[in-house]
Amino acid sequence: MRAVPSATWRTLDERMISKPLPQGLDALWDAGVGVATRLVPQQKRYLQKAEKVLALEKQFSAMGNGKLQQAIGQLRETFRRGRDTEEELHRAFAAIREVATRQIGERPFPVQVAGAPALSSGCVAEMATGEGKTLTATLPATIAGWRGRGCHVITVNDYLAKRDAEWMEGVYGFCGLKVAHIEGDMPPAQRQEAYAADVTYCTNKEVTADFLRDRLVLGRCGGLSAALLERLAGGQKPVLDRLVQRGLDYAIVDEADSVLIDEAVTPLIISGPAPNVEQTEAFQQAAEATARLEPNSDYRINAKYREIELTDSGRRRLAELTEGWGGLWRATRRCEELAVRALTAKELYQRGQQYVVEQDKVIIVDDFTGRLMHDRQWRDGLHQAVEAKERVEVTPPKETYARLSFQRFFRMYRRLAGMTGTAQEAAAEFWQIYHLRVVVIPTNRPCIRRKPPDVVFTTAAAKWNRIVTEIEAVHATGRPILIGTRSVRNSEHVSGLLRARGLECQVLNAVHHQEEAMIVAGAGQAGRITVATNMAGRGTDVKLGPGVADLGGLFVLATERNESGRIDRQLFGRCARQGDPGTAQAITSLEDEFVSRHAKGLVAYLKKHHGQTEEDIAGRGTRAASRLAHLRAERLALRRRRAVMRADHWLDEHLSFAGRE
């Protein structure tokens, strides 16, 4: 019989309902506390802690392996009993640092050591790209493993989870800990074993899905109390033995801004088939009917909020087109819902941007990474509406068994920490949603990145011409170039333009994670041109090839601004890592989807003012348009995340699947 710690029961039961966001005066007070915490200097405090750890270096480096292992054993016992002090924590970090040096040949830099206590104290550590976040995480993860309640290190894909677990296995093993990782195709027995390890590397999607499956298992037997009674009664296979997780005690989230902010509103849904022939046919009929409606006269498009609204004329026209169809079309409200969904698919979801079609299947493209999401579907019939538009087989809608947003899930951990290259811009939200402080850790070597002013054109055509010309000029010098785009369509477009000029390039848009990492890792080789959607390959360093530093380093070219300034900064952070040289340049236009959507009025004025010139129009007006678009986009995204949080609490209160107690 597998032992289940009491922490599991607390996590699965009492912590299932986490505190709602404060309202009214409480929200004002909480926001004030957050501002106060950001005003208190944090960086100096953690650098001073790192100095205390470094002062113990000689004490442990002088030990032989046997004596070091003995010292590690004593520290492990101290933390297991919960009798540790700050001095003991410093000793532990110093010891683990020495272990890393001996086992994997990498001694954490002082700035990496400074990141360790920040993570241990529940902060988001902002560490620039290439500064060694993976190694930094092993220090607090080892401490958490010693405490005996398990530690989850959250990565952005299965490949990185496996790579990091195997890479750091020597460190954890020397420290007396077992490390494991979770992959998408693992059977329940292996997952249970992996979660029972002291340190478990996994993705946000896998850990959340396993939590939901465990909740469904408990719900079937009537809740946790019934499961405990069943176990005491000695049933054939007690429910508790079918749970794969042992609790949510401590998590270190890599790329925290992506997981906790950008993907936070994405609900993870466990569903099953619910065939409905009539409904499937209705999606196809809706696509046919709405193809005959006219924009502006029959319906209005709100691009900013991504909404479609039928006009009175459109409602009358729709009634005429669907007259006599019967079935779902008899109900006026249902008829209009189907039409709006079909129009949304037609006008707001474009092939090569939000999705691709492969082997007659619609596959979603992740907005933030550009990766294909084979196992994901849009909900509320939108996926079926897109399939009907593309004239591929319409898959039956599914019945939802359980759903949970990532931001709701991560708030359930007893302790939470994160690390990323870009966190400052979201400091207020990290505090508001998760009560996490942001600590900026300085780089190990000064950053010497060159960043020329943005180049802005009135039209997209002029922009693409300048981009190709710029790439030709830089490529002639032998420097490697990394080109960032926001969509699969644009990555294919720019690669086509380059090949037409005789320039070979590698296109990175939604391939397998391992291939993706290999392509990104090689993007720093001399003469290499790499086109990548958004932040594809995030978590993989771009190392410069021989002689590239003398040429000026990696040249990063952004072809559009992103909806969050953090994503722009992540892209630019690909170059000039660890003191290397590098250049980051943005070449954009007023016709780019992001700025024209969120700063429509100002963009219209600038277009009228500058006319059809093909010259660079960058200036105060274009900078204002970019800032305004970023402000509006981030404000809109924050409203959506708050709405999801409120919806989660409403579902917990009124439609909980936690079972009866």
Image (cartoon, rainbow, N blue to C red):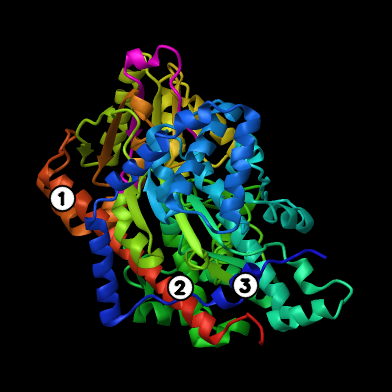
Q: Nearer the viewer, residue 358 or 67?
A: 67
Q: Earlier in the sequence, mark 3 or mark 1?
A: 3
Label 2: element kind:
helix
Which amino acid lies under the numbered mark 2 shown in the image of this protein? Val
Q: To which quarter of the image does residue 484 belong?
A: top left
Amino acid at the residue labelled 3:
Leu
The location of residue 93, given as percent across then percent down, is 48, 41
Is residue 131 part of the magenta span, yes or no?
Answer: no
**Quarter of the rendering containing residue 469:** top left
- Report which residue position mark 3 lands on: 12
Q: Which mark is residue 340?
A: 2
Residues packed near mark 1 inside 10 Å, few (<14), some (14 to 19) or many (20 plus): some
The residue type indicated by label 1 comes to: Ala
Q: Residue at (32%, 34%) from the top-left corner? A: 464
Q: Position of residue 103 (x, y in %)?
A: 60, 29
On the rendered image, what quadrant is the N terminus found in? bottom right
Q: Are marks 3 and 1 in contact (CB under 8 Å)?
A: no
The answer to which of marks 2 and 3 sits earlier in the sequence is 3
Q: Which is the main secondary structure of the residues drawn in magenta?
A: loop
Kindly report the distance in space between the C-alpha atoms of the residues bearing marks 2 and 1.
Answer: 34 Å
In the image, which is nearer the foreground, mark 2 or mark 1? 1
> Which marked residue is nearer to the observer: mark 2 or mark 3?
3
Of 337 and 235, the residue lying toward us: 235
Q: Quadrant of the C terminus?
A: bottom right
Please name the residue that numbered disc 1 is placed on.
Answer: 624
Residue 518 in the figure: left or right of residue 553: right
Q: Secondary structure at mark 3?
A: helix
Relative vertical location of residue 277 with respect to residue 394 in this rendering, above or below:
below
The residues colored magenta run 538-566
Work out how far the residue at label 3 is from the one at label 1, CA to CA, in angstroms.
48 Å
The one of 652 and 82 positioned closer to us in this rendering: 82
Q: At numbered mark 1, what does the secondary structure look like: helix, strand or loop?
A: helix
